[in-house]
Amino acid sequence: LADGEYYIGDIIGMDVVTDQGEKLGVIRQVIDTAANDVYAVAREGRKDLLIPAIKQCIVSVDVENNLMTVHLLDGLMDL
């Protein structure tokens, strides 16, 4: 894989936090769309949060520590 690329199996079950340090949940599914992948983040007591796998949203992916840091674009939490 090229730098910055990951196997889907590497990120399923990965913890997700915001760039502000808020824990969001765990990636439970990767949805393949025509434009880009979308990560479905399972949140306790709430519907899944859908985060597009684009550089404006994905700040870092740390496979070794099982942690993804994301930046939530305006309105993303409202979907």
Image (cartoon, rainbow, N blue to C red):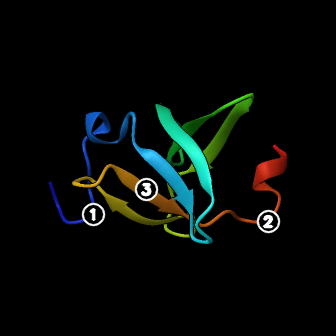
Q: In the rendered image, which residue does mark 2 sit on? A: 74
Q: Residue at x 58, y 51 (%)?
A: 52
Q: Which mark is nearer the camera, 3 or 1?
A: 3
Give the mark nearest the N terminus, 3 or 1: 1
Residue type for callout 3: Met
Point out residue 4 in the picture as x, y percentages from the top left corner. 27, 63
Find numbered disc 1 in the image and state the secondary structure of the residue it sits on. loop
Give the mark nearest the N terminus, 3 or 2: 3
Residue placed most toward the observer, 8 or 37? 8
Residue neighbourhood size for the residue with mark 3, other residues' Cα within 10 Å, grouped as few (<14), some (14–19), many (≥20): many
Point out residue 14 in the picture as x, y percentages from the top left corner. 39, 42
Q: In the rendered image, which residue does mark 3 sit on? A: 68
Point out residue 43 in the picture as x, y percentages from the top left corner. 65, 35
> How far apart are the alpha carbons under marks 3 and 1?
12 Å
Residue type for callout 2: Asp
Q: Is residue 47 above or below residue 3?
A: above
User: Residue 72's image quarter?
Assistant: bottom right
> Going by the image, does 26 lie left or right of 14?
right
